[in-house]
Amino acid sequence: MAVGDVTVASCVMAILGSLAIIVTLLVFPDQLKKSGHKLLFLLSIADLLTAVSYMVNVLVFSTDTTCKALALVGIYFPVASFLWTDCISIFVYMSVTRLRRLHQPNYTSEAVIFRWFHVVCWVVPVRSMTAREGGGWWLSANLCTSFRFAGLACV
């Protein structure tokens, strides 16, 4: 079995798993009112798009422009997924410690926390792609070579 076949198979399984979670939560919308389920839903969206970007990279890898676009998508969504996982752990910590701080005046509401989670998880990956001076590292000619070396593209 070739590396591309293994990549596609793992991407298909990841897509099916993410879709199962997304569809389940959409079929039962009252479950999305729960904070933990909201976080799981958002993580599943990021994971779904990560798996799709990896699979598209393996199946459709042609021009330099396509390579750069797929490289950006293939970097953005895994970072977003990682950050959503971090937010879940922060939320669990805050939920456990909230019981002690619930009646204090400096209590942070869940709506404010979720707004910050969205900012961190959807904006920070964009900032990480534009971190290099001179307009962003994706403009470099070595991006596709680096992307291929990382094993994220068609071998």
Image (spheres, grey):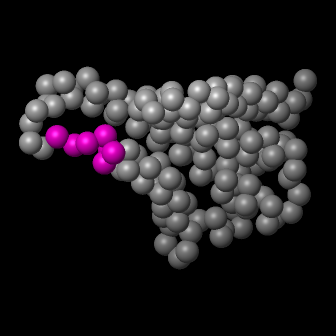
* 102 w.r.t. 116: above or below: above
Camera-side residue of 103 and 29: 29
Q: Is residue 128 visible?
A: no
| Quadrant housing the C terminus | top right
Provide residue 89's location: percent of width, then percent of height: 38, 30
Q: Is residue 116 left or right of residue 94?
A: right
In magenta stretch: residue 109: yes
Residue positioned 22% across, 43% down in the render: 108
Residue at 34% across / 32% down in the picture?
Answer: 91
Camera-side residue: 81 or 92? 92
Find residue 146 and report its horizontal and vertical position in percent. Answer: 69, 53
Place residue 113 in its image quadrant. top left
Closer to the camera, 148 or 85? 85
Residue 4: quarter of image = top right
Q: Which residues are magenta?
A: 107-113
119 left or right, relative to 29:
left
* Quarter of the image with the N terminus in it: top right
Instruction: State whether residue 32 appears in this view.
Output: yes
Provide residue 135's location: percent of width, then percent of height: 55, 74
Identify which residue, 36 or 152, lies in the foreground: 36
Q: Residue furthest bottom?
A: 134
| Residue at (9% x, 36% y) in the render | 104
Q: Is residue 64 above or below residue 104?
A: below
Horizontal and vertical percent for residue 6?
A: 82, 27
**In the depicted structure, whether residue 120 falls above or below residue 138:** above
Instruction: Report the number of discs.
Output: 0
Specify whether residue 73 is painted magenta: no
Q: Residue at x 67, y 49 (%)?
A: 74
* Rendered image quadrant of residue 62: bottom right
